[in-house]
Amino acid sequence: MRRSMRWTGFADELEGRALLSTGGGVWSNPAVQADLAKIQADQKTLQTDFKTLAPTLQKDQQAIQAAIKDALANDPGVKSAQTTLTNDEATAKTTLQNDLKALTSASSASARLAALKLYFGDLASTAKTIAADAKAVQSAINAAPGVQAAEAQLKTDEAPIADDGSALAADYTQLAKDIRAALAGPASSPAAKTGHRG
């Protein structure tokens, strides 16, 4: 639906530009009229497919969420990655707390500077580790068989909408091409360029 709205806006923009340039004459061009008729038909198809498939796609999304929840609870790879993340988060918390204690208890400017450098170094290091752990958890979830099956089902069920979107994209590309040709008119023909009137 968003694609349809975006492409409709694109058509409106093209129409506005053409009307400013030609006073509306370009829209009487047979090729342009055929393009607009095809766009209208394909938009209707997209809207119909979206409405028809909406309940199925909603169920597919729910199935994906259920599969992710199951993977977090039962998949060995996901559980292992999640455990690593949890342990590294706990280690990071302890490390940073100790760094802050060292910073607040420093008795000299040089000691405070050293403690501050250590704190920021550990902060950057632990953030990098936790980010990598979180990425590993997501990768493990994506690799879980149940999640892959649910996502594959969604891809299959939404294929008609993707096809409709591709058709509309092609329609608007053709419309832009035919508008440019109509705007160029006879002046772009070889005979016009040589001044030959036939």
Image (tube, helix red, strand yellow):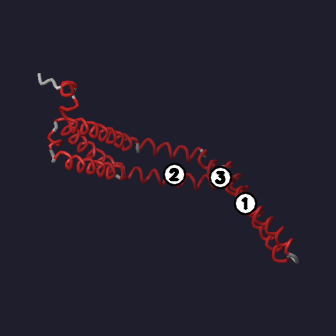
Q: Viewed as shown, does residue 12 lie left or right of 98?
A: left
Are the two marked residues, 1 and 2, in contact with CB atoms closer than 8 angstroms? Answer: no
Determine the residue positioned at 85% across, 77% down: 105
Residue 142 is situated, as x and y percent measured from the top left of the image, at 59, 47
Q: Earlier in the sequence, mark 1 or mark 2?
A: 2
User: At x 74% / y 63%, what residue is drawn?
Assistant: 123
| Residue indicated by mark 2 | 64
In the image, what residue occupies the spot 23% across and 51% down? 16
Residue type at mark 3 is Val
Residue 177 x %, y %: 28, 37
Using the numbered discs, state the Cα–Cα distance from disc 1 to disc 2 in whole angstroms. 34 Å
Q: Residues within 10 Å of mark 2 (few under 14, many from 20)?
A: many
Circle 1 residues within 10 Å: few <14, some 14–19, many ≥20: few
- Label 2 sits on a secondary structure element that is helix
Towards the viewer: 49 or 187 = 187
Give coordinates of residue 158: x percent, y percent. 41, 45
Residue bearing mark 3: 137
Q: Position of residue 98 (x, y in %)?
A: 82, 70
User: Three-letter amino acid code at disc 2?
Assistant: Ile
State which quarter of the image contains the C terminus. top left
Side of 108 relative to 168 (left or right): right
